[in-house]
Image: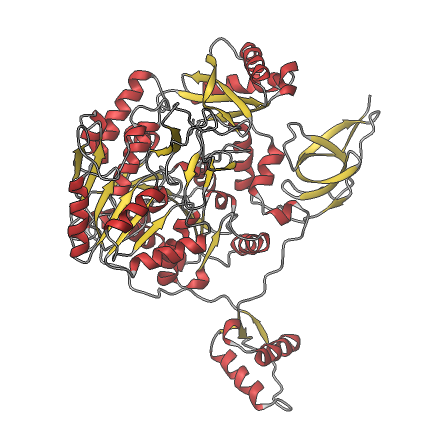
Amino acid sequence: MTIDTNCIEVAILGPLPQHFSYRCDAPFPKSGCRLRVPFGRGERIAIAIGTATCPQDIPVKGIHRILDEQPLLPASLQALLGFGSNYYHYPLGAVWEAALPARLCQGQQIPSLAPTAWRLIADANIAERGLGARQMVLLQRLGNGNVRMAELDSSDRQRLRQFLAAGWIEAAQEPLQLREAPLALRPEQAQAVMALRASTGFQAFLLDGVTSSGKTEVYLQAMERLVLSGKQVLFLVPEIGLITQTQARCAARFGADAVAVYHSGQGDAERLRVWTQARSGSISIVIGTRSALFVPLLHPALLIVDEEHDLSYKQHSGWLYSARDLALRRAQLEDVPIVLGSATPSLESLHNRQIGRFADLRLHERASAQKIPPIEILPLRKKRLVAGLDPSLLRACGETLANGKQALFFLNRRGFAPALLCRACGHVPHCQRCSAPLTWHRRQARLRCHHCGLEAPVPEQCPSCGAAEIAGIGMGTESLEEFLRERFPNIPLLRIDRDEVHTPRQLAERLQEILHTRPAILLGTQMLSKGHHFPDVTLVGIVDVDQGLYSADFRAPERLAQTVIQVAGRAGRGDAPGRVILQSHLPEHPLLLALQNGDYATAATQLLRERQQAGLPPFRALALLQAEAQRAEPVYAFLRAARSCFATELDCSGPVPALLERRAGFHRAYLWLEGANRSALHHLLANAISLLGNLPTARRVRWSLDVDPQNF
């Protein structure tokens, strides 16, 4: 048999587990270039990943077209995607599809970038005869320095095109300058900045700073020399709502033209434009959410992952990657430092600091003169509550408002009530598609499932017994808002949750309203707790966190501790001291007692000790094999069959039902897969993954593998 070497191996964009070979005449495309290839009865976009050898007696189709002369991504990012495919055991073509702007996946060309500034060529041979006065004025401006396109009207832009055709001008790169002076640093901040500036090559830092300790100023001064010397910084935040304030801080320091944002809320054209500018080096700072991790940089120098503990860095559908973890790998591949910042670091990051993988940077004090307020725990047992609130919390709210300040109430439940209850027979309306009760949204007169979005009208009579004794049980932000408006009728109340705020623009407007309204009551869910600076908030009331104390999710205590500290950190950030009051029916719970002094480290140490004793991450490696189908039987049949695919060295438990057993009409269950360490786990998973797809029962379910799962 003869071998034909004129073949290329490609990954088709999409969730196809195998690679394919196509005939290709010279010149061969480089690895990382896009191709149009025949596939089935049509054609697809593919990524060249290397050469291949094909037997000549097997017909091999030829490629249709090479779309790129040069690779879309540098070698470091190509290696990152290859690593991400292997680590999370997900098809390489689907990984590339998730990492690229949508228009590139559709085969569109990379747009050319128009220069933002022009200058006169030093030895330009300009014939002044025949030039008008306006042309001479513009030429003089070009000779005196760079002229920005944004400064010119349409007639001057036409003159620029004439000068360009004559060969008199050229594109200019505007040098960056500081637009505002850096803030004075406290000693701990200065030490952190010095450590980051001194780092060369790859090094991971954990910036563990209490809320309002000035972590952003540390980031800005650490990136200052890099940006002014033409280098680039990638700055990740967990949610779109946090981009606006970060962008404003960076733009104020380095100029708006130096900063761009990249996130899923942008249109396809805008994302491609920012991607292209970053790739060309014309943007100095890219700020974005999870997907921004894969934006190529021409001169990468520093990676920042702010609020590194946040669950939003983990993708929850398709390619189940962690942007925080892959950011560490990217920094290693590009040989640049990375800083992970948080007031409540994840237990994984704290463990990595303990064993020396992360360098330790601490900020123990706030940037303002105010100290971290302790957390007052109000026992609720045998108390006569008013709309679910302790009277002493209401008195504290009244005093705060009388002083012209703001009070923040945190309740992480939307709607008017978490459920409806028939007082006659005890019936609770549930979602027809999920294992969860329907939430009552009284303002819209609807019952709504917060898992699948199903809606239903509010029944006037119990659908089970016919009684007209239906009432809400529990409290949500909508009912708390109604009560607080009645209790404090002359005080503005600003509510932030996903029922009130639907877009990043609405969130930005509401946050600005908070900054300019005093006194005021702020009410919200997690959206209100993450990284926002409210200098006039002096009272924080945490209404209900008890539901997180006894969850079946082993990560729930960590999430609860982080939430309590983050919410508490909104108080006392300005000139006045803060006060934090937490209501609980379990005031003696060890975790709440550990959080009483506002110190996250004590609680985290306790939780790490419990994880180690239980043999849970970060002390062991974990993966979940998840399956779902519209009937329960094929789910459990597949998972029982899947157990035989895993080697005996792997601790395999299950199948067990998911914590939300039925969602959007699908029954869900999983296998719990544990290994002594990551390398052992991945070796065994790699051997099993190809066997799973060949199981007869696999065709009857949707299944996925979640490595390092974060949300149960």
Residue appearing at x 27%, y 52% in the figure: 521
Quadrant containing the C terminus is top left
Q: Residue 538 at what x, y percent from top left?
A: 20, 50
582 left or right of 412 in image: left
108 up-or-down from 594: above or below: below
481 up-or-down from 465: above or below: below
> What colour scheme was applied to this rendering of the protein?
secondary structure
How many numbered discs, if any? 0
412 left or right of 286 in image: left
Q: Is residue 324 visible?
A: no
609 up-or-down from 129: above or below: above
Q: Residue 316 at what x, y percent from top left?
A: 49, 33
Residue appearing at x 44%, y 52% in the figure: 504
> In the image as oriented, which residue stretches furthest toward the front?
467
Residue appearing at x 60%, y 35% in the figure: 94
User: Which quadrant of the figure has residue 576?
Assistant: bottom left
Q: Residue 116 at what x, y percent from top left?
A: 53, 67
Camera-nearest residue between 169 and 132: 132
Q: Residue 667 at what x, y percent from top left?
A: 53, 22
Camera-nearest residue between 175 and 14: 14
Quadrant containing the N terminus is top right
Q: Is residue 87 visible?
A: yes
